[in-house]
Amino acid sequence: MRWSTRAAACVELALLMVAGGCGGGDGDSERVNSARYHYSIALDPAMTQPVPATETWDGRSELSHGELFVDEYDLDNGDFFFVVGAPVDGTVREFANDAHRQAVQLHGCDPSPKITDTQLDGAEALQYDMLCEGNHIQRVYAVKDGRGLIAALGADAARREENRSTFDRLVSTVQWK
């Protein structure tokens, strides 16, 4: 059952934290190392209980929050934030375009989002800002050493400026490992 798998993942996360998988580094924030993907993230006070992925994403399967292959860090206001990774053979632009084509088909996302060149912990990245099924979605796609990461925030479209600030704050704590 999905719930029991997620509950087991929460226990795994708790054990990881006790065993030293989390630690300081961003002031008083604790860091969580993903058990499946090559990154760590500082836990934000707005995050509810993190739920680690119990499966590894293949880079092609339907991508959405709540899937067994995403590390989920939902926020206390009901917004969702997740991070997922996959091996990447091409450029960050190819990785982002492939994932965005899927988002357009599966979630009704804007086919022409606002795209901004950026960096994720020193790696080349692209940030997409768009509406998907009435939600304000922001995703950052990054590639480093043949590994890709996607971090995504889904939030109320009425709070676009607040959402951008929240997304920037959360993504700024993601570090490659």
Image: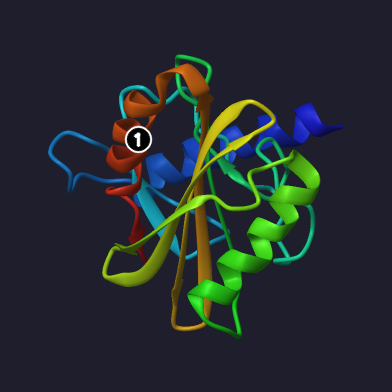
Dot 1 amino acid type: Arg
Task: Note whether 86 is above or below 72 in the view shown.
Answer: below
Residue 20 in the image, given as x and y percentages of width and height: 34, 49
Residue 119 in the image, given as x and y percentages of width and height: 31, 64
Q: Residue at x 64, y 57 (%)?
A: 100
Query: Which residue is nearer to you in this view: 85 or 108?
Result: 108
Q: Residue at x 61, y 85 (%)?
A: 89
* Side of 52 relative to 120 (left or right): right
Q: Residue furthest top?
A: 77
Task: Note whether 2 is above or below 87 in the view shown.
Answer: above
Q: Quadrant location of residue 170?
A: top left
Q: Residues within 10 Å of mark 1 (few under 14, many from 20)?
A: some
Query: Which residue is nearer to you in this view: 145 or 155?
Result: 155
State which quarter of the image contains the C terminus: bottom left
- Tell me how the rendering is colored: rainbow
Q: Which residue is mark 1?
A: 164
- Element class at badge 1: helix
Residue 53 in the image, given as x and y percentages of width and height: 63, 47
Q: Residue furthest left?
A: 27
Q: Residue furthest front?
A: 112
Residue 142 in the image, given as x and y percentages of width and height: 45, 66
* Side of 173 relative to 17 (left or right): left
Q: Residue at x 66, y 60 (%)?
A: 99
Q: Residue at x 36, y 48 (%)?
A: 41
Q: How many marks?
A: 1
* Side of 94 relative to 117 (left or right): right
State which quarter of the image contains the N terminus: top right
